[in-house]
């Protein structure tokens, strides 16, 4: 049995960081060697997250100030769970020290620094690294992740949208333009941000859209679609805030390339869509293609790294409706990042995730 | 001061019936003279709804078996809060006895009995009454309601969709085809139905689509749009179940008739949409047109008869996004029915509703 | 018909202030002439509370800086919805200007400034007014409120505890010592305070005690019990935070003065308790004495000014268990304050409250 | 490496059964060889629990009719997740076939068949087995469980009450009479029972007591206390239903044997209580003794097999307040049953549980 791989989390005090710590502590092949947090430096993991108090696996694990040198010594794989803009400052120095870096922020998800500027309102802090980064969607970029050094783990909304859409666009079954993604997110999606609008009394018994019509996640959604379609793509994306802790439910409105006016045409298209998904995901451990009358439900994926996908052809409107459900903090963030780490480090892809 | 108008509720033991009873008990111009329920016949209103126990306004009000003759004697206005198919059996006889009838079921919302058969899977029980019925959307059919005898109060989803869409279609600002309505409903929308899928543990921390792609409410949505557009219309409608008690949030994806590529065109269209809504609803007591950055939030309408409407033009996609929020049991059912009653009986339209 | 009485709310931007504004806007005998808020000065009520946007009853009502002179001119009755310590600064000057003052803070609930110091950790800012203030529990101090000028509206927890307990102590049916009150509160009880612990993700799917064993509300609970019992009283009080917006549920553990070992003794005590409550509350419009097997449920009182009370004798333990439910923001704060105003101003006690 | 131990679950379609299946599927030392359910016989685990659809670990696991012979062949350890009264019918025959039986129902938790009759309203179906059964509270009866064949896994409320109370009673630090346990439970505690009172709309935004003053779980609580105290004990127990999926929070009101009027006495008692808990649970993997200002919160234990315990001495009332939090379905049911299985089978006690 080989030595465990040493890992660290920079910025471990948010919801994604906490979940990442939980997953790494339970992972059979790694050790969580360091966690950093400016706010909580000096405190143990258990003091900040009561769920880990007295946990023998992390009794001596204290938050430290984030220092690149120390991190480079302590860990072979470093996860960045930092705000965008800040993550990029850590990535380069850590790569120079020979670490593998898995970034959960938006900093390396785009190839284009000008799109970054347009959507994030600031210059990219490390544009030279953009071409080096691999978009960490394992079901799509497994080979690239394996060879990568800097993994840009996808956003939660993009994960829930791209996994269902990409195979259909690639197989030219649906048009790449006119795509609408209507998404619902649990409140943990806003992070652990202390703001009036996220108080219990402002969210409970509330349903509301936000960020309409131009959410930042659009940039990576469109870039990935563009790469697959081979042409520029514009997507309509509407996020909504829903009073649950965890989960994203996305409903996609797509236009099949072929019309399906007759029953025969419809049956043929049904087959093609089914085969397309089967080919793309039939052997994927974390994709659940729903059968029969089943539709996605976030309660069936929360706490797991699974994505549920179901679809319906609507002969009345000529559209293909695709629905997906994920846990925004696991498959949409920390779980997917661990999945990438497993690929990167040669672990079984499901290690520590089921 | 005139005598109060006598009212009755047939089938008062569901959520809409309960809310209707609450509204009528507090209404300054009416008396709630009778409530019926097969299941609870013999019990007082307060025994079935603890909220009304000891309420002096209904201490002696007992549920009775629903008998047309007695209802005809007891009440001048009869509300039917019954399942579809059953409501139609009461309407005709009550009208014959001279009552005004306000039906909260789907039985008289359509003009076409064949569409009814297609969507409700049974023959219409009283097709002769379909032409006589008025679709009880007060902001649209105020004059017809005033003269009506049989009011078909709209469904909750249709209310949340038609109020925002109809003025735009009528003004020919948006195309009547290709409309997508993505709606989120609180669990009370399923009624007080005792079924596994509506248990707390099955709904809480859950978000899920259902009835995709052909929900029954599509029939009245499309018929009303068709009447306004002057041509047949097909709508894409996707309902979702969300863990809140009350509320519907609808996000509508519409295509403006005019392109708005330039900033000037966009500004012009902004003006036209704003004026269209202002003209349609500027003086409506129960429509709140949101301004500035505000977006609808169900928590701002629950417990009220208001609908909130906001909209955004998206220059990137060329679409108009319209969002609305209502309380599904009030504006979407019992409140709107009382609003119709106010019109019918000559009360101020807001009586008993604010 | 007489002119409406002019009212003002100082500190109207919290949950109690918002609810108070809603109640006063709908009250048939008063006008809401002024609302103040340092934070929101200059904005309309509708801008701060979207629920009131476009409301014709308050279209021109803007938050102003809280200035005593202006308030004294604008209003005959002034409600203080301010933090403790701050409220006391306004009360004296407003009384001097001839206003009636209804204070929702803790500042005037105690007779003893030393108990205030002990529990609130500061000197009382206006000790001279303590004897002048009336404890605004209408079911108990109706006559005093009628003649009062400064009403100290009770805390939410104390309301849920004192209403069930006081009649039993007064009738010497239960011992005044050894009382235990175990209370559950919705999150609105913490006010609109922006703090990590009240974020949706920290409260949802959480149940937790807090402030054990010495919550500030103990001081007024014990003082009121002491006044009734004629001797000093110590109470055990344990509050808990529960993921609902509204409501307090209290379970009280009391020791009957008489033993009830035999069935005859038990039946006799049952009778005495029933008569005691019937005498105290049989004609109270806002007290619902539950009958038969019914037990309190906050969902039956939220949105109302009612308190539900039920009780059980337990022959096995020799205890009397009493349970109550209120809406913490209405009967526990703003509704009860309006009830006091109704008494003070000679309105029917239920005006604007049902 | 030895062969996995074969396990079966009888009555696996409720919430406890589902959680048990999840735990056993993830357990490193066992195989889940059979699941039974009259209602779902013939369907796969994944069809009934969408969370397990496509799970390769149970792709071929189908619910079967519960037949003792087949179960005896299929499994070495059989879990009974059946209603009380039914479980007892299976236990004897399975024991005769040489299986170890872990019963999650109430059937074998009592030593006395007459107490069973009193609280469960029926004759015990297998009284001869009562003396043979071991009460499966691992922290208390580890040695007995190791040697047992029939384990009666404790109820959820009793677990949350007995673990904090037993060490104090045993050490004679608190009186065994006069104990009050006030408990709050999530709705999953009611099982997957389809009844009006457990609909989302009846539980959400609701807090309510039930089963006051004589809940069935009192019988096992009192019997266990009696065994420890060496005298008969009567407990006051008040359960409440709270709108969360998971968790029990218990607040206990205890009377220390010694008075602690002076600060010295109080400090001494503080020490004794701390040492008592440290001795009892300092090395327990599933007991978290909270330190400093921390109080239990169900959100810190849901999804885990942990119990959180905190306590406060109240010099004002002379009482000791002890608070605990567990996940009712894990530590309160399925997790604790797996913990017993680990002891019984010689696995590390935490296997499959962290």
Image: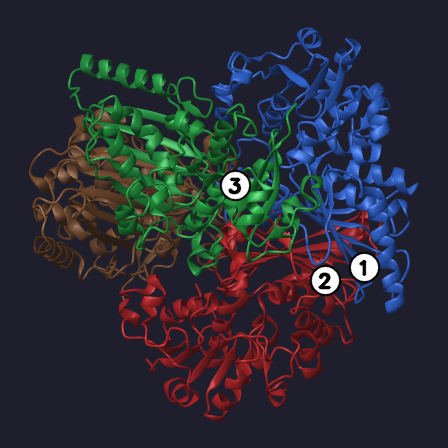
Chain colours: A brown, B green, C blue, D red
Q: Residues within 10 Å of mark 3 (few under 14, many from 20)?
A: many
The answer to whether marks 2 and 1 mark residues whose Cβ atoms lie closer than 8 Å is: yes
User: Residue at the spot x=52%, y=35% of the render?
Assistant: B303
Q: Label 3 is found on which chain of the structure?
A: B
Q: Nearer the viewer, residue D56 or D66?
A: D66
Outermost residue toward the bottom in this view: D96
| Residue position for label 3 | B78
Point out residue A300 in the picture as x, y percentages from the top left corner.
36, 57
Q: Label 2 is found on which chain of the structure?
A: D
Rendered image quadrant of residue C157: top right
Residues flagged by tags 2 and 1 on a common chain? no
| Residue position for label 1 | C319
| Residue position for label 2 | D213
Q: Is residue C91 above or below residue C160?
A: above
User: Residue at the spot x=16%, y=52% of the render?
Assistant: A142
User: Residue at the spot x=41%, y=46% of the render?
Assistant: B242
> Visible in this render: residue A101?
no
Q: Label 1 is found on which chain of the structure?
A: C
The answer to whether marks 3 and 1 mark residues whose Cβ atoms lie closer than 8 Å is: no
> Visible in this render: residue D257?
yes
Q: Is residue C138 above or below residue A104?
A: above
Q: Nearer the viewer, residue D34 or B70?
A: B70
């Amino acid at each position: 049995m080989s030595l465990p791989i040493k890992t660290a989390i920079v910025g471990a005090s948010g919801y994604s960081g906490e979940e990442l710590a939980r997953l790494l502590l339970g992972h059979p092949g790694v050790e969580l060697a360091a966690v950093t947090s400016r706010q909580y430096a000096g405190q143990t993991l258990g003091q900040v997250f009561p769920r880990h108090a007295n946990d023998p696996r992390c009794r001596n694990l204290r938050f430290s100030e984030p220092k690149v040198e120390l991190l480079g010594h302590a860990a072979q794989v470093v996860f960045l769970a930092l705000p965008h803009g800040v993550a990029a400052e850590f990535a380069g120095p850590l790569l120079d020290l020979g670490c593998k870096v898995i970034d959960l922020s938006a900093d390396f998800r785009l190839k284009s620094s000008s799109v970054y500027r347009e959507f994030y309102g600031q210059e990219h802090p490390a544009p030279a690294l953009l071409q080096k980064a691999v978009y960490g969607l394992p079901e799509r970029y497994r080979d690239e992740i394996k060879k990568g050094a800097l993994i840009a783990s996808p956003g939660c909304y993009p994960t829930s949208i791209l996994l269902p859409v990409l195979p259909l666009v690639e197989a030219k079954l649906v048009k790449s333009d006119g795509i609408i993604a209507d998404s619902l997110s649990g409140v943990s999606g806003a992070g652990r941000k202390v703001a009036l609008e996220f108080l219990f009394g402002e969210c409970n018994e509330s349903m509301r859209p936000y960020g309409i019509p131009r959410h930042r996640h659009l940039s990576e959604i469109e870039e990935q679609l563009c790469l697959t379609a081979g042409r520029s793509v514009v997507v309509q994306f509407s996020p909504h805030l829903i009073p649950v802790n965890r989960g994203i439910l996305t409903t996609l409105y797509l236009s099949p390339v072929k019309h399906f006016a007759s029953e025969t045409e419809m049956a043929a298209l049904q087959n093609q869509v089914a085969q397309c998904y089967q080919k793309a995901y039939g052997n994927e451990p974390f994709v659940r293609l729903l059968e029969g009358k089943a539709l996605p439900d976030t309660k069936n994926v929360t706490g797991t790294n699974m994505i549920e996908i179901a679809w319906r052809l609507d002969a009345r409107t000529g559209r293909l409706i695709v629905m997906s459900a994920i846990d925004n903090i696991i498959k949409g963030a920390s779980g997917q990042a661990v999945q990438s780490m497993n690929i990167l480090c040669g672990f079984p892809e499901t290690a520590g995730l089921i």
